[in-house]
Amino acid sequence: MRAVQVTGYGDVDQLKLVDIPRPEPKENEVLVKVKACAINNTEIWMREGAYGTGSKSGWRPEGVQFPRTPGSDITGDIVSVGDQVDKSMVGKSVVLFPFTSSGEEGTEHISEDMSFIGSEYDGGYAEYVVWPAELCYDMPLDTYPESAVFSVSGLTAWHMVKQIQVQPGETVMVTGANGGVGSLNVQIASKVFGAKVIAIVGDLKDEEKMKDLGATHVLSYQSDHLPEDILKVNGGPVDSVLDVVGDALFETSLQVLKKGGKFCTSGSAGGQKTNLDFRTLYLKHITMYGSVLGTRSEFKDMLQAISEEKIKPVIDKSFPLEEAKEAQVYFKSKGKLGKILLLP
């Protein structure tokens, strides 16, 4: 089969298109013919060494073992199964839950042995992938590309919204609202949990599209007086912030949060380190959450909401598998709205 492998830490020249043997499913696994695989920050940062290199590079203590096939947002058809798997699964169109874990229900994502497809296991930048049968779920939508855009981004966004315990009528500010996680934060907070959403983007050309996704107000981070803009449109401080940007909007986020407000981050594309005045934190009684991925129960709840069309796929552009380098470069460019796909 054809696959794209990361051969080491570095730029996109570390991505190699190769011909390798098709994997065989173990007794509890299935073989999936990959139809679509969405791109996430996680595989790019893994290649770049942004999580660290060597023993600190992946989700497990031993680090990423190269070469590795990345890709964790995967849909496809089950074409064969292991000896312990019900043969009726052959032919099913599925979406893959993106990690394994021995953690108890509700704590799977924070278990020490949590292992990620595309990092600790070979992933979806390939024509075939093997995965545990119990971690394959029916696709929530009719098409492979549309169903592929939710697994990591959607689960992360859903868990973020659950962590801050959004209540109907509350105001949630979403940074990076035009990205994969951000656009889902907007939808989930507004259309599933009934919040008012202030979406922060770079270019206001997508204002109407953001409002279609559920944003009440859309503002640009390029404004010279963004905190004032936020307070004005909301008529005062916001209840919570869902952040994927990091340093670039951290000070603004704390400034516009109400006393007792909540700040939840799952990314740092705008800077991984920041200066924090602890007085702001304790004098405003702010609660802070770090968040990535979520639980299998949340994954199932998310798939149900997708199947009910409460959450819609947002796709910016698709690339063939052999253009994985170009796809990752495009992923890092500004001005996108939604997810980038590889189509084997």
Image (cartoon, rainbow, N blue to C red):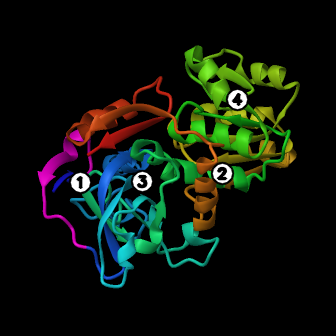
Which label sits in the foreground, 3 or 1?
Answer: 1
Residue 340: which quarter of the image?
Answer: top left
Q: Of label 2 and label 3, which has the lower sequence position?
A: 3
Does 217 sit above or below residue 37? above
C-alpha span from label 2 to label 3: 21 Å
Residue 108's spot in the image, x, y percent?
A: 56, 71
In the displayed structure, does residue 91 sit left or right of residue 163? left
Please tell me whether mark 1 or mark 4 is closer to you in this view.
1
Query: Could you say which disc has been placed on residue 51 in the image?
Result: 3
Q: Is residue 89 visible?
A: yes
Which residue is denoted by mark 2 in the rendering? 160
Residue in the image at 49% along x and 74% along y: 101
Q: Is residue 92 above or below residue 70?
A: below
Q: Nearer the viewer, residue 30 or 131?
A: 30
Q: Is residue 237 magenta?
A: no
- Mark with earlier residue (1, 2): 1
Mark 2: which secondary structure?
Answer: helix
Q: Residue at x 62, y 19 (%)?
A: 207
Element at badge 3?
Answer: loop
Disc number for residue 127: 1
Q: Looking at the rendered structure, which numbered label has been put on residue 215?
A: 4
In front: mark 2 or mark 3?
Answer: 2
Point out the tag, 2 or 4, that comes first from the N-terminus. Answer: 2
Total marks shown come to: 4
The region drawn magenta spans 8-24
